[in-house]
Amino acid sequence: MTSATHSAARPTRGGQQAFSGKASSVERAQGRIGLAFVSLYTLLLLVFGILPTLYAIFLAFTKKGAFAGFDNFAKVFKDFRFLPAVEHVGLYLLVWLVSLVVLVVVLAIVIHSLGTKWLSTSVRFLYYIPGALAGASSVMLWLFVLDPNVSPVSFLLHGLGFNSFVETVQADRLPFTLAVIAFWTGAGGWIVVMYGALNNINGEVIEAARVDGAGPIRTAWFIQIPLLRKWIAYMVILSFAGGTQLFVEPRVLAQASRGVVPQDYSLNQLAFLYAFKQSDFNGSAAISLVLLVVALALSVFFVFRGGLFERA
Amino acid sequence: MQMVGASPAAWLGKAFAILLLIIFVLFFITPIAWLLLAPAKTERQLLLDGPFALGSFSTLADNWQSLVTFQGGLIWTWIGNSAFYCLSALAITLIVSIPAGYALALTEFPGRRLLLMATLIVMLVPGTALVLPIFLELSAMKLIGNPLSAILPFSFFPFGVYMTYIYFSTAISRDLLDAARIDGASEVQVFARIAMPLATPVIALVAFFNFTGNWNNYFLPYVTLPGRKSPIQVGLAELLSNVPSFNPTSAGSTTISLSALALATLIAVAPVMIVFIFAQRFLVTGMTAGGTKE
């Protein structure tokens, strides 16, 4: 009876009465140590997860401390820079996610089909290396790659008709440029994840398909890709949420291109300008909150519907 | 008959697959190869010679000299800052996440499921989404410019807690812990003697992702730690404004050449590159995929 008050789902050792006193004291000790062990983490979660969110909500719905309803949002949405920023980010996401899904899945399946072990390992590692360059260093390197004067692929850039850095980063092709940079940095990691997931597919299923006369393409389409679905969804959701946050790439490109890439290209840059150039923390919080809601909605949807974490 | 027809097709398919892999090897590696060679060339050589022409050690030494003397060795200050912020955060992350993951996996306490759910949700929210809210909060707490404004947010690592949780729930059975308890081990002893000795792989995993992620983090320290307190990623972008090729208008007194900028980029990524090379065997197995499966 004493132990029943604890939620502990496990039946305590065969319900022996003699042990029940001991078991409940063990459970109390466990509860104490459990709480102690998660206390620091919970504190960080509150201070850097929950609290900033609440503070952003407070700022977004107030003005000079007084409740302002949706005024901040209305102001931000009416800002002439807002819709173009949404459009830029949307276009970039479209290009990036489509290429990410298609190429990552195809490359992972091809690498997985390689018979030679060292070859497969080396290719995966070579694809993964650019992941070491994320953030500013990745864009910094791409400044060189995109500048036809010094680029290792200047023949390609000249071939496309770009003769200067400024021409390469013209606004209308920027979503593609940014997608290439993002793909270069992150695709290798996802290829490895997909490869790991392919390894978890039962070999007998593949073998049975082969015996039935399915070639590599039919096997990929009817067996491997359906079994990868969960991981593809995981990749798309994380990448989508991450992509909406676009900041460092256009910021560095703006700095390097003498304003050809605008300072307010992405939504996060706009939020940044509100906070730092206009000292309008309320407007900044409103934009951040919109982005946060998108990310949170995707995350919640995935946790509860994606099935990836059902053990939790 | 079908076999006879399939053979050239299979051969073609294989050739196409190999070609595809090679094209992407070139795509991923070309920029890195260029970066490794560029610091040994003069700016003139970068502009005029072939992209993979070799430079010389004396040029490398010159570029090194001009980079490390830039504003009295500012680059070392930035690297030192990065090391300080990331290693402090790493230590706190391990102290915080390993016990938390253990507790979530192997103990019962009120609020366990709620905390687990919150962890999963926050883990999938990109870090940058919270940067401006965290900045606004830190600014209200008057912590902007204080090293803690990077170290503490860097130490909040729900992904690490989640990895530890998964690891402990698969690697250790509750029965094993119960057996130790029956033998009279206290809860702390159970953790220290049974869980910790088995935790090395997950500690390495958490440390790897935490360190590399924080080293490359740009947005948060960019807003919370300006100027000389910046980590190297922010400093790198700062250097850019002293490169005349990209900013012809900013004819400052000290300038940075393209070659020195390439060298700075290489130095900035070197620590993570080294970690990658040491970790390559586990990186390419897709262990994280296996780890979160089932």
Image: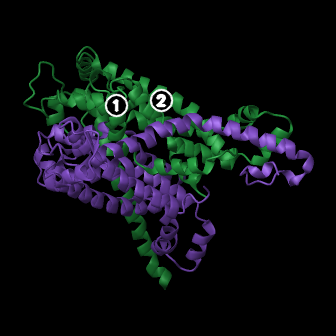
Chain colours: A purple, B green
Circle 1 sits in a helix, a strand or a loop, which is it? helix
Q: Which mark is residue B192?
A: none
Identify the amino acid type marked 1: Ala
Do discs 1 and 2 share a chain?
A: yes
Left or right of A193? Residue B202 is right
Chain ID of residue with mark 2: B
Residue A233's quadrant in the figure?
A: bottom left
The residue lying furthest to the right in this view is A18
Identify the amino acid type marked 2: Ala
Percent of width and height locating residue A119? 48, 51
Along the line of sight, which residue is nearer the eye, A266 or B37? A266
Q: Are marks 1 and 2 in contact (CB under 8 Å)?
A: no
**Mark 1 vs 2, N-terminal side:** 2
Q: Which residue is mark 2?
A: B89
Residue B18 visible to the viewer: yes
Percent of width and height locating residue B1? 49, 86
Chain ID of residue with mark 1: B
Q: How many numbered markers are drawn? A: 2
Q: Which residue is mark 1?
A: B140
Where A1 sits versus A282, above or below?
below
Would you call the spot at circle 1 few (<14 residues within 10 Å), some (14-19), or many (20 or more)?
few
The residue that appears at 52% across and 49% down in the rendered structure is B118
The residue lying furthest to the bottom in this view is B1
Would you call the spot at circle 2 few (<14 residues within 10 Å), some (14-19), or many (20 or more)?
many
Along the line of sight, which residue is nearer the eye, A195 or B77? B77
Label 1 – label 2 distance at C-alpha: 22 Å
The residue that appears at 57% across and 70% down in the rendered structure is A206
| Between marks 1 and 2 in the image, the one whose residue lies nearer the viewer | 1
The residue lying furthest to the left in this view is B249
Percent of width and height locating residue B220? 34, 35
